[in-house]
Image (cartoon, rainbow, N blue to C red):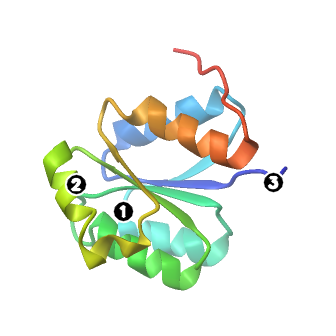
């Protein structure tokens, strides 16, 4: 089985820390970027299987980042993690701008489900995540 390589992008350092800790609890190291521009630099340097990105970030938002990331790495699995409401998410999922998005999850409640989904896709099974 392939080893997942995950890039997490969020302008909130606390969110980055929580996601990094959750992956760490199952011995998976992630790289973190505090901005879309930093994420693009990481993508130029390293191959990732998955990128988790916030939608609402200053400067370049998650949709634009997803589009640029897919230009660099066409097979990248892109997970959008956002605090927007479910209605806003379902409306945005129908727009052409989201064609580079593989999954959409809502903050904060969707965090565990998002991580389980990524682990299931990369390993074919779920992991017990420590609280």
> Which is more foreground, mark 3 or mark 1?
3
Nearest the eye: 80 or 86:
86
Name the residue that disc number 3 marks.
2
Query: Pointer 1 and pointer 2: residues touching (CB < 8 Å)?
Result: no
Q: Is residue 84 visible?
A: no
- Marked residue nearer the N-terminal end (3 or 1): 3
Left or right, 10 with reference to 116: left
Q: Which mark lies nearer to you, 1 or 2?
A: 2
Q: Within 10 Å of the Cα at label 2, are there few (<14), some (14-19), or many (20+) other Cα atoms?
A: few
Question: Which residue is at a point 64% across and 40% down the rendered structure image?
Answer: 119
> Does dot 1 land on a helix, a strand or a loop?
loop
Q: Quadrant of residue 42?
A: bottom right
- When the figure is inspected, residue 2 is found, relative to residue 59, above or below; the finding is above
Q: CA distance from mark 3 to mark 1?
A: 27 Å
Disc 2, disc 3: CB below 8 Å?
no
Q: Which residue is mark 1?
A: 35
Of pointers 1 and 2, the one earlier in the residue sequence: 1
Q: Is residue 21 visible?
A: yes
User: For mark 3, does the 10 Å Cα neighbourhood hold few (<14), some (14 to 19), or many (20 or more) residues?
Assistant: few
In this view, the mark in front (2 or 3): 2
Q: Residue furthest right?
A: 1
Q: Residue at x 65, y 40 (%)?
A: 120
120 left or right of 79? right
The residue labelled by disc 2 is: 90
Marks 2 and 3 sit apart, C-alpha to C-alpha, by: 32 Å
Where residue 131 sits in the image (x, y, percent)?
A: 51, 14
User: As drawn, which residue projects farthest toward the bottom?
Assistant: 71
Q: Earlier in the sequence, mark 2 or mark 3?
A: 3
């Amino acid at each position: 089985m392939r080893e997942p390589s995950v890039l997490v992008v969020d302008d909130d350092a606390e969110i980055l820390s929580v996601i990094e800790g959750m992956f760490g609890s199952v011995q998976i190291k992630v790289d973190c970027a505090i901005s879309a521009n930093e994420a693009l630099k990481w993508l130029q340097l390293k191959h990732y299987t998955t990128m988790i990105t916030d939608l609402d970030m200053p400067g370049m938002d998650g949709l634009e980042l997803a589009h640029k990331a897919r230009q660099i790495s066409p097979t990248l699995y892109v997970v959008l993690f956002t605090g927007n409401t479910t209605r806003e998410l379902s409306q945005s999922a129908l727009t052409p701008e989201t064609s580079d998005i593989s999954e959409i999850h809502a903050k904060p409640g969707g965090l565990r489900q998002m991580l389980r989904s990524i682990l299931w896709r990369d390993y074919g099974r779920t992991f017990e995540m420590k609280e």
